[in-house]
Image: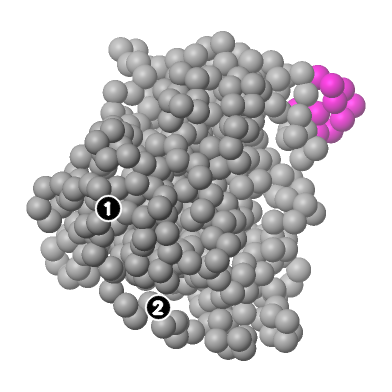
Amino acid sequence: MSESSFFSDDLEYVQYKDNTNINHLPGDYGIPVLGYTLSYVQRPYEVIDQNRKKYGDIFRTSMTFQKFVMALGPEYIKQLTLDRDKVFSSRMGYYAPLKHFFEGGLLMRDFDAHKFHRRIMQTAFKTTAMRNYVNTMHPVIDKQLDDWDGMREFEFYPHVKELLLDVGAKVFLGLDLVDGETQRLNDAFLAMGDGTLAIIRKDWPGLGLAYRKGMNGRRYLDRFFNELVPQRREGDGTDMASFFARETTEAGDVFPTDVVSKHLIFLLLAAHDTTTAALTMACCYLAENKQWQERIREEVRTIIAAKGTDDAGGNRIAFDDLATMEDTGNVFKEIERLHPSVPAFMRRTVKETEIGGYPIAAHTPIQVSPIYTHRMEEWWSNPHSFDPDRFKRMEHKQHPFLWAPFGGGAHKCIGIHFADMLFKMVMAGLVIRYEFSFADGQGFPDAIQHFPFPKPKNHLPLVLKKL
């Protein structure tokens, strides 16, 4: 394939509609039109579990106006994500909900084209770059966390979302956002996330539709990033946008501005919202399980104490400290097990194949489910309980895809180590400054929103006690 072909959408399999001839599989399609959409959005684990008990690990179902095959368990996550025979298209799996919002992102590219585009990002995630990000992030994190002191009414979710957007602007874009810019970017990303879940998927003006708001957010981000990328090609900036903008093809050409812009939009959303979700859900469990909050605090204090007072960075977590933060890392893993940032991976076949002994025709949508696999009772002890020490016991090592919140194979999340780093840095800064508890009259949130990213519906009201 020529390099020019990697920038086009001239792919034969994208021209076909979904194959819906899957009645040879056990299962049902739920209520007319909507299928299991409404119940799944509210209670994904329970809905999947009910169907599994009736039909087994593989069944047909319907959600969001789409009929598809559900395949449960780590072996099917392995089959779809490793995709050794290039059978499963990520682009077409996510095409229906994401096509207008994240077109051009890595998730929306397949096979050789995906490998070609992943090259844009490779320099930005090398160890040297990651070390620099730590130094860049510390002042932003410190300022935001210090500003939380004295707040009487404190909802964790919006505050940590703002913190991570400021971190993302600095690390990803090399920008110090003023308040208005932060809010506009935040609103645009929120609108796009809500738009992916819209039932009425029409870009009609004047009706206040979520889909329309999402598309307006995408148009704003296109303008913002298409202006930024040419600026980042100049100079020697060490932010991600600069690395992306200066990356070249094998022929020595820089990637087109709109291509780089599309990758930045998708990556910034993924990095920002997934880590926001992980930190928020972690604080739900750490407010309820004070012994774990204290274990993390002591781990951080021990690392800081070992640096000595003569070390100018002694009050901060350094890049080389991250690998030693076992308890904090296991909390992160446990949160991604209980509430994976991406609850399901979607693919569509590009040719005939077989799953679990069932023949599957070309162009058939298939979904595998980390949110269910991560709680399968035959694999996990007390699967619904918060127990980070299960990772010390190596429960997740029973199968290489038993714990798979970041996917696998060619599409495995390119930012997995960045997410781990960011979670640990923010959590370390939080626990050494504050002890936190649920606000008066509050307990563990009764209602959790699972899509597009997990978060408590009450935004997690907390009381912070300065240490």
Q: Which residue is mark 2?
A: 13
Mark 2–mark 1 distance (CA, rounded to whole Å): 23 Å
Q: Is residue 306 magenta?
A: yes
Q: Is residue 300 magenta?
A: no
Residue 189 shows in the view: no
Q: Secondary structure at mark 1?
A: loop
Q: Residues within 10 Å of mark 1 (few under 14, many from 20)?
A: some
What residue sits 65% from the left and 64% below the top?
121
Question: Where in the figure is residue 143, as x and y percent of width and height?
Answer: 60, 37
Determine whether, in the image, residue 180 is placed left or right of residue 305: left
Q: Amino acid at mark 1?
A: Leu
Determine whether, in the image, residue 433 is placed left or right of residue 162: right
Residue 146's tag is none
Q: Residues within 10 Å of mark 2 (few under 14, many from 20)?
A: some
Determine whether, in the image, residue 214 is placed left or right of residue 295: left
Q: Quadrant of the N terminus?
A: bottom right
Q: Which callout, 2 or 1, points at the residue further toward the start of the chain?
A: 2
Question: Where in the figure is residue 216, as x and y percent of width and height?
Answer: 31, 66
Q: Amino acid at mark 2?
A: Tyr
291 is higher (above) or lower (below) than 179: above
Q: Which residues are magenta?
A: 305-316
What residue sits 59% from the left and 74% below the top?
112
Q: Secondary structure at mark 2?
A: helix
* CB contact under 8 Å: marks 2 and 1: no
What residue sits 33% from the left and 16% below the top?
442
